[in-house]
Image (cartoon, rainbow, N blue to C red):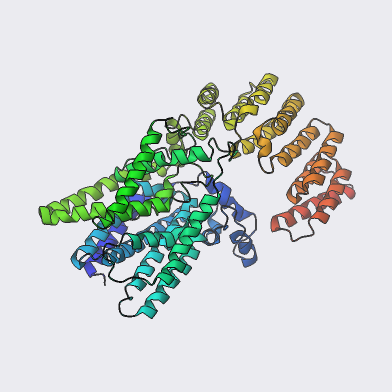
Amino acid sequence: MKLKNKNVLYLACTCLLTILVYLPSLKGGFILDDFHNLAEMTKYGDLNQWENAKQFIFGGNAGPTGRPISLLSFAITSNAWPNYPYIFKVINLIIHLLCGIFLYLATIQVLKFYGYSENKIASIALISCAIWMLHPFMLSTTAYVIQRMTQLAALFTFMGIWTYLYGRSYLAFNQRKAYIVMSIAVICFTALATFSKENGILLPFLILVIEFCHPNRTTKIVWQWKAIFLILPSLTIIGYLLSLLNFSENRWIIRNFNQVERLLTEPRILFDYLYHLYIPSFEGNGLYQDGYIVSKTLFEPISTLFAIVGLLLVLIISVLLKNKAPLFSLGILFFLVSHLIESTVVGLELYFEHRNYASSAFLFLGIATLIFKLKEWYSVQVYQCTVTLLLLILCFFTYQRSVLWSNTENLKLYWSQNNLYSPRAQVELARYYLIENDTNKSIQILEKALEKRPDSSLLSIRLLRHKIDTGVITTQDFKWLSEIIINQRPEWQAIEDLKLLIRQTTADPDLAAQFSDDMINVLDVMVQKSRFKFIRNFNQTADYEKGVLYLVSQQNERAIETFEKNYIKYKNVDLGLSMVGELLAYHQIESARNFLKNTMKLAEIQLSKKQEEAFLILINHIYEHDQGKQYD
């Protein structure tokens, strides 16, 4: 089916409308995980040089695949980091438009495949895709720079579906061409999507869903091809997910839920997603979702049982109605299968809006079909007014959300004020009042948050940091932390805050003299009695920090002894370099020289550019000292 000029014009107008409502959000800055992931671009030097860029592109750790395609897209604009988020956001918006275009093309192929008449296909596809492109729920994925990974996986998924269905259309008269195109579509686009983000591996399963919902099986695929390219990959994914089942109590140390609780909670979340997708709103809880209420049993909260029963009913109805209402069934089943990886047994955080970016692709097809029927039921004018009103409502909500995203500080403040049970949100709110010099309010917010979330180590550590900043810290506060941290759950951000707490303690000589021993005691308790000891690499981090604290408090022999034990036990090049730097800073030149020699032996393997530069700097410092120059 060729696109007519007017359909191309309507699609172009939809893209233009999307650009207009998204424009304010382009002014926003980087946020949260942007820094953690994109800061790696500075680690390897100038990414305009291929050797450096290659290390960044293939050195990713955001997921099992490393996501090299996504990292390549960031490397191209590395010169804009971290001063020009606008450039990154513009690229995200372009990708969003491309996703919309290829979703439109894929939807046309689906409708054609399902036997819809040509005079309906373009209009229904355009309405459905316009809803998707202009929906406020999609803005957070586009405006949040690092979620380009999600966007690229969705883009290649939509391209794969379109290419597959295009190839399938040749089955009736050119089977050889059909199977070649279909095979290329499944293999190539699954690989591209997966190496953008891991849930791209679901493409064969999603194509299988499209095949399953087909109401008129006029041309069938030979079972051998279907088994190899669609069924076997789908069963492999299911088998892999089943292999991850582990109902032990402490399955994920850093989470406030175990696998059973996650499986109980996700049906409630899926209905929450569907609610926001079908009933658009201004701005939800944003990215601070660590306060989401976890389902402890089927009846706690009672909505857990209703959600599970409701989800099973929706699934059964979707299967039963696949012949009478194929677009409804397709939308729901595509949605559920898209959530298989991120909303089941994998130990990710519970809730994120971006998980609906690809999964909602066909959710609005049923609505679009009903709107198109208004032509037959009433008149063309009623149909046109309905479409216009719907798109204006979506534009209004998305534009308002876009304006909020244009100011990153106001955005985080908005989320913080609306997420009372989120430790991250309350930490951000406390930080805001600290900046505003309302120190009492800052501390009160953290204390109240701890009453609601006594399990959060992030809140307790941040409370001590704020007390240091406000000059009210006492030895009793460190003793309190030693007692409360034993029963709190570990959090990654809490570990980073712990390092900053130590930096704050050691930065001021008076604080260092007064509280170094107290801080060492906190670390001992965390390593020996708390759940932090089960976190990978925490023990070596704690030992290293103890060595620093000993140096600061002028217990040099104990510091060197602690560093030596750490070095012998963990043999970590980066930590070895850091130890040398700390020893130099406190004039332990001979010890620094010995540590550097040992670290150089350990690092006979190829070093990163950052490590090479660190070696040269440290060697130069020791050389200067040997030449009689003062070092400080």
Asked where in the image residue 9 lies, by quadrant, the reply is bottom left
Horizontal side of residue 172 vs 377, given as left or right:
right
The residue that appears at 35% across and 68% down in the rendered structure is: 165
- Position of 40 relative to 583 (above/below): below
Q: Residue 112, percent across and down? A: 26, 67
User: Is the N terminus in the top left, top right, bottom left or bottom right quadrant?
Assistant: bottom left
Task: State the image quarter where residue 258 is shown.
Answer: top right
Most foreground residue, 400 or 198: 198
Residue 357 makes an appearance in the image: no
Q: Which residue occupies the foreground of this view, 238 or 537?
A: 238
Residue 357 percent coordinates (x, y): 40, 52
State the quadrant of the C terminus. top right
Q: Farthest residue in the left direction? A: 378
The residue drawn where x is 57% and y is 47% is 36
Q: Is residue 591 left or right of residue 197?
A: right
Q: Residue at x 24, y 51 (%)?
A: 367
Against 195, residue 421 (above or below) is above
The answer to whether residue 3 of the structure is visible from this angle is: yes
**Residue drawn at (38%, 69%) of the image:** 164
Left or right position of 458 against 323:
right
Counting labels gives 0
- Residue 228, given in percent of the width and then of the height, sits at 46, 68
Viewer-closest of 185 and 129: 185
Residue 256, image x, y percentages: 54, 35
